[in-house]
Each structure stands twice: as C-alpha cells, then as structure tokens.
Amino acid sequence: MEKQFDIVVIGAGPGGYVAAIRAAQLGYRTAIVEKYSTLGGTCTNVGCIPSKALLDSTEHFYEASEKFKTHGIELDNLRINFDQLMKRKNDVVKQNTSGLSFLMKKNKIEVIEGKASFLNNTSIKVSGNGGDWNVRSNYFIIATGSKPSGIPGVEIDKTRIITSTEALSLETLPKDMIIIGGGVIGVEMASIYARVGTKVTIVEYANDLLPTMDHDLGKELKKLFLKRGISVLLNHKVQSATNEGNSVHLKYLDENNEQKEMVSEYCLVAVGRKPYTEGLGLENTNIKLDERGRIKTNQLLQTNDSNIYAIGDVVAGPMLAHKAEEEGAFVAETINGQKPHIHYHLIPGVVYTWPEIASVGYTEEQLQKENKSYNTGKFPFIASGRARAAMEPEGFVKVLSDPKYGEILGVHVIGPRAADLITQAVIGMYYETTAEDMFRMSYAHPTYSEAMKEAYLIASGQGAINL
C-alpha cells in the first residue's frame, strides 16, 4: 500500500503537530505519522500537561492545609483523594489529545498510526496495527522528540526505579521518594509529591538546583524547598540504585567523597532527556548525528538531505515544547519560500514549582564568563503589596542590563505567576527596549508585575519605589 504527500511529519508532539497544521494552512497535502494511538507526544501525554495538572492540584491542597486558616477559611478532615487526583490529570490529558485529533480533521491532515523508518530520502515505511504503508513525500519533517536519560549504575525498571512517565501515574501515594537530579523535571516532581505528604530527597551532582539557569534562582529554590521539608543534597554523586522489592537501595558519594546509603520506596531518575532516533532508518539517508545523538541541521533546520528537516528535542537547543512549536512553524514556512526567523536567545525557560521560576536572556554567570559588564536590578516580592495581600511574599525579580545603553540582557524571576510575567520581558528584549523604557510604562496597582517595574528601575541606577 502506498500514499503520496507534499509534506510528512514524523512525530505528533508540540513541534510535529504545529508543523503539520502550519503546512496544511499553507496549502500542502500533509500527513503526520505517530507510533502511539494518541497525538501530542511526551508533552501532552506524559510531560508538560499531566505534570501541570498535578502541580495545580497539589498546590491547591498545600494552600488549603498551610494558608487557608490564615485567610479565615477553616476546614475539617482535609485529606488527599489520590485516585481522584490522578483521574483529573487523566481527564485533562484526554481533553488535550481529543482537541489535537479535532485539529487534524479540521485541517484535513491525514494521521497515520505506526512507526516510521526511512527507505530513502523520499519515502518511509510505516509499520502499524493496520499493516505496512509505503509513504512517499516531497518533504519530511522529523519531530520524534526525546526520551528520559539514565546514568551508570542505575537501571530504570519502571516499577521502583522510575522516570517521570511512571511518576505521573503511580497508583498509590508514596511515603518517601528519592529524586536523582535537581533540574526542571526533578524539582517539579519534588513539588508535586512533597505537597501531598511524600518525604522527598533530591540528590544532585551539581552545586546548585537548576544548574543551567541563573544560580540565584537555584539558591532561592533550595531555601524554599528546605522550608517545605524537601531534603536537597547538592554536589552528591549517585553510584548505584537497586530494586529490593518494596524499596530502592541507593548508594552515593557525598560532598566530601564519603560513601553513603539511603533507602526509599521509589527512586525517580530525572537526569535529563536524550534525542529519540531509534529505528528511524537514518542509515538509509545522508542524515548525520552529532556527538550527543542529535540530528545535525543547518540554520534552516535542514539535514544533509535538503528535503528532510528536523525540529524539537531531536536537534540542538533547549528541550522545550514552545521551542519545538516555533521550529515547526519555521520549517513549514521555510518550505513555503518564506523567510521566518527564530530568536533562540529569547526563548524563555519556565519551571512550574510554586513559586514559579522563569528566565530569558543571559544569566549572570554567562555574562561573567564572557567578561561583559552589566548592571543588576533585584527586587523582592516581599516588598510587593499584591504579593503580601496574596500571602505570596517569596522570591524576587532580577534584571541584568547593559550599563552603557540600558539594553536588557537578561531577566530572571522566582515568584508568583513568574511564567506569565516573563513574557513581558521577552517582548521588551525582542524590541530591544532599555530598562528605562520598561519602568517608564504604567503598571496597574496592585499587581505582581510591579515587581518587574521596580527591578528595571533599580537596574537603571535609580532607587525602587516602595510598594
């Protein structure tokens, strides 16, 4: 059986489905190949969406147990219904995957279920429950995403030694959990389970949580985690993890290089993700991989076969859903002869702990490494009237600006609604505004965004206005 298309997208995650929709909007006969029965990839099914659903649910419980009494709201017999917690998460995922299926039909995109493998640069074999298909296309877009990484000495068995995928679907609430890795996935999963009573210990190899972000953010998050009862072991090296049936036995070296051991009900491995290219038949094309297993592309995201493109987690750059989305639209428009542009330096990073963490542009460590001069404007949320009224006094806004021209070099926020506030900074940096431009605008009072204004004001060399 054979099918012919203008553009075929392999992988139906955020990058893939955006690429397919944009291609269809531009008039191309488009198909999307997905090996699973639901669309949305890791993000929608076992990543961004279910984790945010659980983060929101558990934050509600934490608020009710820790803050409601101060607000004058008294509850009796407050408890977690873990089954309902997971059911709501599943319902949210289903709503999103159903919405994607509707968008495929609306845009007349053919969905082919099965696993794709290149026969050459103009055709793929798709193997699925309905048999094998030979699919030919003028263009292909590889959007196969990534999968969890592991570390030596730790075998992920998906029962006791698990990844975030399994952690998002546990059947019972664990009494304790070790999390290997203090990056984005690790700290978000720590937040989910610690809020509902699980004793969480994070073991991180680096000297800070969130080691790729501005270090002030990780330091502040550690303080907040310790206040919430989460143990944080930095500069620790895991040697092995063993499934003992009902528990996991972890061996590690502490910061003094001394051998230590720990036992917990579960061990979650959250040490990052790696590109997924297995079984793609890349050996039947001219496509090459780099030293980290990512598909090599040029600035147009073309591979060595000019009619095959690659986007998202499978290529270089941060593994972010919104980065993949931008690249999906970029490639479809490039094929169409347009000249789109992606500002990679202005793609924000967000961590959905509470308070949230968001960042865009240079970190202070990057500026120091490049010997670039900068001004710093830092304003704490405890000085914000809106934050005090909402009992959200933790965190700060940190602005880095050029001392000569006032250009904004980086903005880093840990605080309430940081994920939403960072967009304002992205807009300002996109249009190359100065810190003075940003504080001269009128901000509604009282709002969390006023903390941004104060940080811009300080970065410009002026004193903050008390909120």
Image (tube, rainbow, N blue to C red):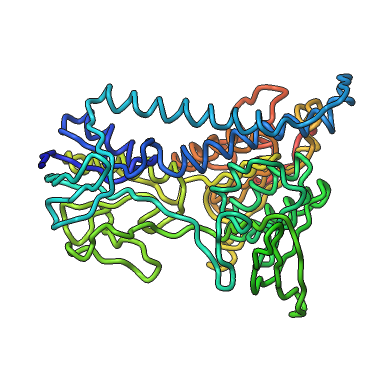
Q: Which of these two is toward me, 416 or 246?
A: 246
Query: Can you give x and y, in whole percent of width and height, for residue 70 in the image?
Result: 89, 26
Query: Can you give x and y, in whole percent of width and height, for residue 97 in the image?
Result: 42, 30
Query: Can you give x and y, in whole percent of width and height, for residue 9 in the image?
Result: 25, 43
Residue at far front of view: 245
Q: Is residue 405 above or below residue 55?
A: below
Which residue occupies 65% across, 64% down? 243
Q: Which of these two is toward me, 397 or 105?
A: 105
- Choose top left, top right, bottom left or bottom right for residue 265: bottom right
Image quarter in which the C terminus is found: top right
Query: Can you give x and y, in whole percent of width and height, for residue 446 in the image?
Result: 72, 23
Look at the image and tell me whether residue 162 can be seen: yes
Look at the image and tell me whether residue 214 can be seen: no
- Choose top left, top right, bottom left or bottom right for residue 440: top right
Q: Is residue 276 above or below residue 65?
A: below
Q: Is residue 462 above or below residue 176?
A: above
Image quarter in which the N terminus is found: top left
